[in-house]
């Protein structure tokens, strides 16, 4: 009874942002990324996959103009609130959390820009951006970079087909990984 009495009503956009973030995390946890994809199964690798999927969603939401602006901002806020909580759970001191979050935000915007440019140019440019950012701490093969680039292109295409109502329902519909040769756009 008290829980209902004191329960805070959640803004529908905030609930949508949390659902989208959960979908991002679920997708980033797929074992195939860490196997066939060559993404390091480490804190950095997991962070990079979350950032990649977040960047794809923010990119999609930006294409919907101001109507999706609030949702995009809330997704960003949920992402970095979660990063803050995770850093604290790992024992990072209060004095260091702010600096680490600032570096993560800078990394996010850098990745967002690199992936947008890579998607616009396609082919080798996208593979290079993924190799530098997502796979940067390990050696990767040309096949892994190509498979990840096909996946990112397929994800961007799938997200472009999702209407705002589906995204607000927390259903981004990321494609499978690894993509088949015919799964790309």
Image: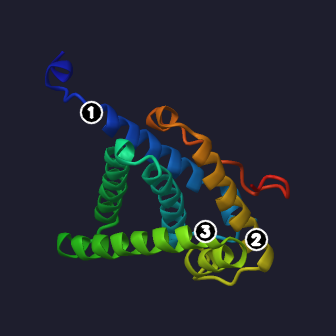
Q: Is residue 35 visible?
A: no
Confirm or deny contact between disc 3 and disc 2 (CB under 8 A). Answer: no
* Position above or below: 66 against 9: below
Image location of residue 179, percent across then percent down: 77, 56
Rendering coords of residue 15 (x, y %):
35, 35
The answer to which of 176 and 32 lies nearer the viewer is: 176
Of mark 3 and mark 2, the one earlier in the sequence is: 3
Secondary structure, mark 2, is helix
* Residue at x 32% of width, y 65% of height: 87
Which residue is identified by label 3? Answer: 120
Distance in Å between CA atoms under marks 3 and 2: 16 Å
Q: Nearer the viewer, mark 3 or mark 2?
A: 3
Q: Is residue 88 left or right of residue 176?
A: left
Q: Is residue 36 left or right of residue 7?
A: right
Residue with the most extreme right position: 181
Task: Tell me where residue 141 sits by quadrant.
Answer: bottom right
Between marks 3 and 1 in the image, the one whose residue lies nearer the viewer: 3
Residue under numbered circle 1: 11
Q: Residue at x 31, y 39 (%)?
A: 14
Tell me the SS state at disc 3.
helix
Q: Position of residue 117 (x, y in %)?
A: 55, 73
Q: Would you place residue 159 above or below residue 93 in this image?
A: above
Quarter of the rendering occupied by the C terminus: bottom right
Residue shown at 65% from the left, 80% from the top: 128
Question: What residue sits right under mark 2 in the picture?
Answer: 146
Q: Earlier in the sequence, mark 2 or mark 1?
A: 1
> Residue 77: where, in percent of width, then height?
30, 54
Q: Which mark is residue 122?
A: none
User: What kind of element bears circle 1?
Assistant: loop
């Amino acid at each position: 009874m008290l829980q209902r009495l004191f329960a805070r009503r959640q803004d529908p956009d905030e609930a949508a942002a949390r659902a989208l973030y959960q979908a991002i995390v679920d997708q980033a946890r797929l074992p195939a990324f860490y196997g066939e994809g060559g993404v390091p199964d480490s804190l950095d690798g997991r962070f990079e996959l979350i950032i990649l999927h977040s960047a794809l969603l923010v990119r999609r939401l930006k294409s919907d103009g101001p109507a999706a602006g609030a949702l995009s901002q809330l997704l960003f806020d949920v992402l970095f609130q979660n990063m803050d909580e995770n850093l604290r759970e790992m024992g990072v001191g209060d004095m260091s959390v702010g600096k680490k979050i600032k570096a993560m935000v800078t990394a996010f915007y850098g990745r967002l820009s690199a992936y947008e440019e890579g998607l616009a140019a396609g082919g080798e440019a996208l593979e290079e951006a993924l190799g530098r950012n997502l796979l940067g701490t390990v050696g990767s093969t040309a096949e892994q970079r190509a498979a990840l680039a096909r996946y990112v292109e397929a994800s961007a295409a799938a997200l472009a087909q999702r209407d705002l109502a589906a995204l607000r329902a927390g259903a981004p519909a990321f494609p499978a990984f690894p993509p088949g040769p015919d799964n790309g756009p």
